[in-house]
DNA sequence: GCCTCACCTTGCGCCACGACAAAGACGGGG
DNA sequence: CCCCGTCTTTGTCGTGGCGCAAGGTGAGGC
């Protein structure tokens, strides 16, 4: 297995204000792992023995209900930590991260966390910020699901994906990883049928351009208008 | 203003593993404040200059959408920290905490947080656990809103309130603070009309007993069954 | 090049739930 | 004790979007 790219890691907000030597010691205990699309990093309910950082690629974190319904709780982007169950006072993982694209993660045994945080409060502070942002985003989603109709929720979800995984192209901004209608449905609490209908309608208005596991936003302002409820 | 009850604070999980002298220094910078029912501690959008701990009482944290729709993001229970915007990388408060019952909060200026965390990593670790649990709960609510019908969501919300604010009584378990149908609606993403209908149906089956701003659960097992979808 | 699987589209009927409306009941304040 | 505001109940109606069903289409494997 190749070496971990030091400069990439050094630049992450999670490790801001951390000394190089501390970072070196932390990385020396890390294990790198490649994950192919469709593969999982760990499984929901499994005992949490490690925590993770996504270096490259993209992960969808899913939860399944007792009835077998699946939802996507979150998309993990490069630089994000995940599988943080232990720091959150759980002994099992609450969800399953599935690689949407070819990905590379690094992982540490749980003990490493407590050990390093004691010596390096910045790590805890930075991690808290990251978790705090996730909490904010979760509250935003709750508010949207409680008050908005499906089309607006889908618009919001797409805008969020643009910001987090958008890639400028000639015709507009492409969502930079394979994303099915089903995925979008599981992110917005609806069905793939409804998402498909919405995308079709948008496409005929020139707002987006679809495709198999593809999505390209051509008219962001109009999408924003839809998200604000001006439909 | 009376003294802060030291032993009460000492027992909070947030301050576990913290030395008495550190805790004393932290408390010496705290300000105590009484909040009457209906009053707010701060307002959504206001610049975040302080963070808070609820000592007594109960707060409902609301968010209003640009359209004026209101939802309850969270209920704050005694011992919880809130108004933590700064640690979460925001400079304004994302919601408005309103006292549901007579409450007492203590507050600190923002600088205190960074200062104390540097010397006392446990504080950061404990705070992260608390935020982590809130994140879990938020994900649970998202999953519920995405996959469950209204009645089940209401059942889940009531069960959660029982666990967090239940008080054993002769006839069952009472939710220990004033709670309107509207509140429950704002917690579950529905309307007060629907909540009222659901409570009426439950009452006629002997599962709960309602009242003006009151709720008493008489048959928890059946409520759990409803929450699991056996209706 | 063809087959097959996975993904996507579209139509139709139904129902849970929200919108609207109106009237009852509890409780605090004067 | 009565008044008024707030909270609650209950009815009717309309509809967004889900369930079900059937048929397209692109991509990868052999």
Image (tube, coloured by chain):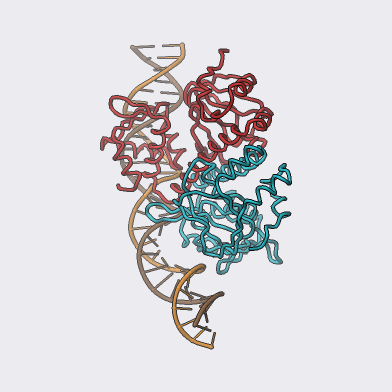
Chain colours: A red, B cyan, C brown, D orange
Expressed as whole percent of the image width and height from the top left, the position of residue C12 reads 33, 45
Q: Quadrant of the N terminus of chain B?
A: bottom right
Residue A66: image quadrant is top right
Residue situated furthest left in the rendering: A205
Give the residue drawn at x 48%, y 51%.
Answer: B95
Query: Which residue occupies the foreground of this view, B214 or B196?
Result: B214
Expressed as whole percent of the image width and height from the top left, the position of residue B115 reads 60, 41
Query: Which residue occupies the foreground of this view, A161 or B206?
Result: A161
Residue B207: image quadrant is bottom right
Give the residue drawn at x 50%, y 28%.
Answer: A59
Q: How many marks?
A: 0
Let me know if residue B231 appears in the view: no
Task: Locate residue D28 relative to residue B74 in the image: left or right.
Answer: left
Q: Is residue A87 above or below residue B214?
A: above
Task: Locate residue B124 relative to residue A171 in the image: left or right.
Answer: right
Residue B176: image quadrant is bottom right
Let me know if residue B103 appears in the view: yes
Expressed as whole percent of the image width and height from the top left, the position of residue B226 reads 59, 53
Give the residue drawn at x 48%, y 60%.
Answer: B194
Expressed as whole percent of the image width and height from the top left, the position of residue A123 reads 59, 32
């Amino acid at each position: 297995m190749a070496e971990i790219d030091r400069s990439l890691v050094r630049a992450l907000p999670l490790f801001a204000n951390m000394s190089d030597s501390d970072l070196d010691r932390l990385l020396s205990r890390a294990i790198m792992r490649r994950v192919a699309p469709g593969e999982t990093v760990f499984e929901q309910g499994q005992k949490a023995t490690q925590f993770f950082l996504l270096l490259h690629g993209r992960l969808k974190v899913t939860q399944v209900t007792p009835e077998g319904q699946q939802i996507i709780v979150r998309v993990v982007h490069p630089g994000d930590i995940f599988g943080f169950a232990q720091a959150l006072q759980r002994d099992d993982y609450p969800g399953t991260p599935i690689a949407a694209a070819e990905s590379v993660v690094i992982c540490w045994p749980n003990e490493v966390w407590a050990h390093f945080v004691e010596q390096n409060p910045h790590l805890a502070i930075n991690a808290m910020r990251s978790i705090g942002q996730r909490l904010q985003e979760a509250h935003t989603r709750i508010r949207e699901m409680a008050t908005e109709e499906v089309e607006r929720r889908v618009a919001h979800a797409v805008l969020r994906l643009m910001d987090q995984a958008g890639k400028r192209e000639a015709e507009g901004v492409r969502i930079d990883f394979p994303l099915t209608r089903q995925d979008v449905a599981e992110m917005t609490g609806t069905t793939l049928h409804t998402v498909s209908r919405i995308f079709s309608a948008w496409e005929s208005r020139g707002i987006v351009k679809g495709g198999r596991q593809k999505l390209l936003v051509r008219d962001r302002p109009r999408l924003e208008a839809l998200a604000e409820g001006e439909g």
